[in-house]
Amino acid sequence: MTGNRRFHDGAREAGQVLPLFVLFLVVLLGVWELAVRSGAVNPDLLAPPSRIGATLWEDLASGRLLDDARVSGLEFVVGYLPAVVIAVPLGLVMGASRRLEWALNPYVLGMYATPAQAWLPLLILALGIGAAPKIALIVLFTLFVILINTASAVRNVDPVLIKVGRSFGASRLAIFVKIVLPAASPLIVAGLRLAVGRAVIGVFLAEMVGASAGLGFYIMRSGTEFRVDRVFVGVLVLVVVSVALTELIRKLEEILTPWRQRTRI
């Protein structure tokens, strides 16, 4: 019943928001097009939406954009998934063990605070030119935000819930599996959502150096060719993919945590 009610509430909200979204988009594109067509904005600096749309269709039809998107998508998956596999279990252990947290936290925070792209020259020297340094950079961009969120999620579980489990004689493992994990899962999934954006940034930056394909390479090459329309096409694809992946993980959160109630103001 709760799942059905949340589905219908979500559908009703989408029906209410969609017209406003479409209206805002139409107004934005219309003002943008008029500004460029009237000469108020230099078309060499800001391509009109009609030209961007035509370029998008042209590069989709030729397969050029799809080939670059396929390369970037593969790099995203190969970099994002290992980061999740490493960061989530390690974050759970760090959150559950105070000693391990004290031992590792300075290193984790130091790596998170250091711009991951600063490691790119060293990664290239160590791993050479190719896919390996790109994937390593994406992992660095992604891993620590998931790790920090996961550890924080475990540490911030309501102590009352744990006391209740102990009062019923539950073992430490049972408390962790049946109480801590369900309570921490929303913040863990929030970390996965944040990591999507970080991974996309990692893909883009990795393809700026020593790449011959990918959306980052597509955008950089278009910029050197002064093809502003293609730059916008590449950015648009990155934005759409990032939003779609983030929304997918949000749906996953709803499936994994059906008991959660969304706060409404």
Image (cartoon, rainbow, N blue to C red):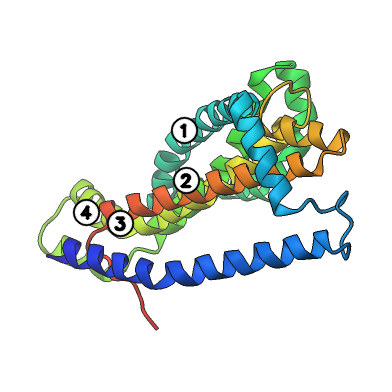
Q: Earlier in the sequence, mark 4 or mark 2?
A: 4
Residue under numbered circle 1:
81
Type of residue at label 1? Leu
Write the residue at 66% across / 31% down.
Answer: 59
Mark 4 to mark 3 CA distance (whole Å): 22 Å
Q: Nearer the observer, disc 4 or disc 1?
A: 1
Type of residue at label 2? Leu
Residue under numbered circle 3:
254
Residue 24 visible, this orientation: yes
Type of residue at label 3? Glu
Write the residue at 88% across / 62% down.
Answer: 39
Q: Nearer the observer, disc 4 or disc 3?
A: 3
Mark 2 to mark 3 CA distance (whole Å): 14 Å
Residue under numbered circle 2:
245
Q: Using the image, determine if residue 89 lies above or below residue 259.
A: above
**Count of numbered badges drawn on the protein:** 4
Q: Using the image, determine if residue 166 lies above or below residue 243.
A: below
Q: Is residue 41 left or right of residue 55?
A: right
Mark 4 to mark 1 CA distance (whole Å): 27 Å
Q: Earlier in the sequence, mark 4 or mark 3?
A: 4
Query: Pointers 4 and 1 in contact (CB under 8 A)?
Result: no
Quarter holding the N terminus is bottom left
